[in-house]
Image: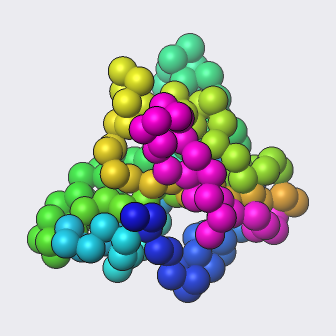
Amino acid sequence: MRVRVPSEDLQKIRLQAEKDYPNETCGILIGPIIDKEKVTGIYPCRNVQDDYHGEDPVSFPRTARTAYFIDPRDLLRIQKEARQKDCEMRVIYHSHVDAGAYFSEEDQRIALSEGKPAYPGVSYIVVSVKQGRAGEAALFDWGAEAKNFLKYEL
């Protein structure tokens, strides 16, 4: 079962990515626990990568132009609200600035914990934003057999 992202939500993600350019954008989609394919809410998040980079550039060498870090307060708020609605995280999305919609080594590194998905059952969307205009978007799901994230068209 693959998550179905409504076209209006994908359009909201694209607009957010253009607004946040030249930095990466990020956010979360939620859906009902009883329907793993459905998305019922979109939550734009604050990319706090620059804050962490400024405090500790050794541990966080990238800026918000080439990385995202969802504000932990946003993550907690969204998870709490999702539980109250009998929902769960369905998709984590972000953009790539002046690059394609691929799942980078860095994306994989932060999506995994000990070689397994950090958020089991959660898909990822990457949107390409080149020169301020959102382009290609792709969905990535964990392939248990491949032990890797596999790309799917939206």
Left or right for 91, reference 53:
left
> Where the N terminus falls, by quadrant?
bottom left
Location of residue 152 in the rendering, given as x and y in whole percent from the top left corner? 62, 58
Relative to the observer, which residue lies in front, 145 or 85?
145
Residue positioned 15% across, 65% down in the render: 83
Seen in the picture, residue 99 relative to 56 is either above or below; the reply is: below
| Residue at far top of view | 58
Residue 39: quarter of image = bottom left
Question: Which picture quadrant has residue 68?
Answer: top right
Classify the position of the C terminus by image quarter: bottom right
Expressed as whole percent of the image width and height from the top left, the position of residue 129 reads 77, 59
Residue at image coords 56%, 14%: 58
Q: Residue furthest bottom?
A: 8
For the stretch drawn in magenta, what is the main secondary structure?
strand
Residue 51 visible, this angle? no
Relative image position of residue 22 (x, y in whole percent) = 75, 53
In the rendered structure, which segment of residues is drawn in magenta?
Answer: 132-154
**Residue that appears at 34% across and 51% down:** 121
Residue 35 can be seen in this image:
yes
